[in-house]
């Protein structure tokens, strides 16, 4: 093979191309989760996943809103010590000095 994957992207990708691919994947995930949320609005796990995708997309206000919705629906959904989403989200908010509007 000539150093390319089946996708046509080289195996030695630069950071910019890799970021675009990741962002496109996150955007696809966001669209799927929004569709799922519309079908199952009371499913805490969907809101928790939405929070994580929003966080990775650097949208902390929306991430916090989704995380709080997950907490309201099922308080246990955000208390997993291995996935301290609230702590990570708080760090993101501090970095951007964003004040969420809930």
Image: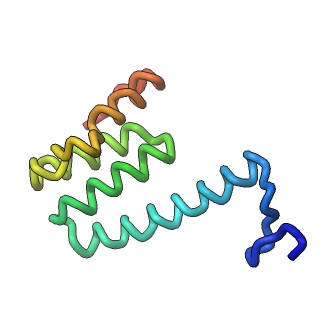
Q: Is residue 28 above or below residue 97?
A: below
Percent across and percent down for residue 82 are 26, 44
x 44%, y 61%: residue: 30
* Residue in the foreground of this view, choosing between 16 and 80: 80
Q: Is residue 59 left or right of residue 77?
A: right
Q: Which image quarter: residue 93?
A: top left
- Give the image location of residue 39, x and y in percent: 26, 75
Between 101 and 10, which is closer to the camera in this rendering?
Answer: 10
Residue 61, horizontal then vertical, whole percent: 37, 38
Say which residue appears at 79% left-offset and 49% top-offset: 14
Q: Residue at x 53, y 60 (%)?
A: 27
Q: Is residue 47 left or right of residue 12?
A: left
Q: Residue furthest right?
A: 2
* Residue for point 18% across, 59% down: 44
Q: Indicate whether 92 appears above or below 6.
A: above
Quarter of the N terminus within the rendering:
bottom right
């Amino acid at each position: 093979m000539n150093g390319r994957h089946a996708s046509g992207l080289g195996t030695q990708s630069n950071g910019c191309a890799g970021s675009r691919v990741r962002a496109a994947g996150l955007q696809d995930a966001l669209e799927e989760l929004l569709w799922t949320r519309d079908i199952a609005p009371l499913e805490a796990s969907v809101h928790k996943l939405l929070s994580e995708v929003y966080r990775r997309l650097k949208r902390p206000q929306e991430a916090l809103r989704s995380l709080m919705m997950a907490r309201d629906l099922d308080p246990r959904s955000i208390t997993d010590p291995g996935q301290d989403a609230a702590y990570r989200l708080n760090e993101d908010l501090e970095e951007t000095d964003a004040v969420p509007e809930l």
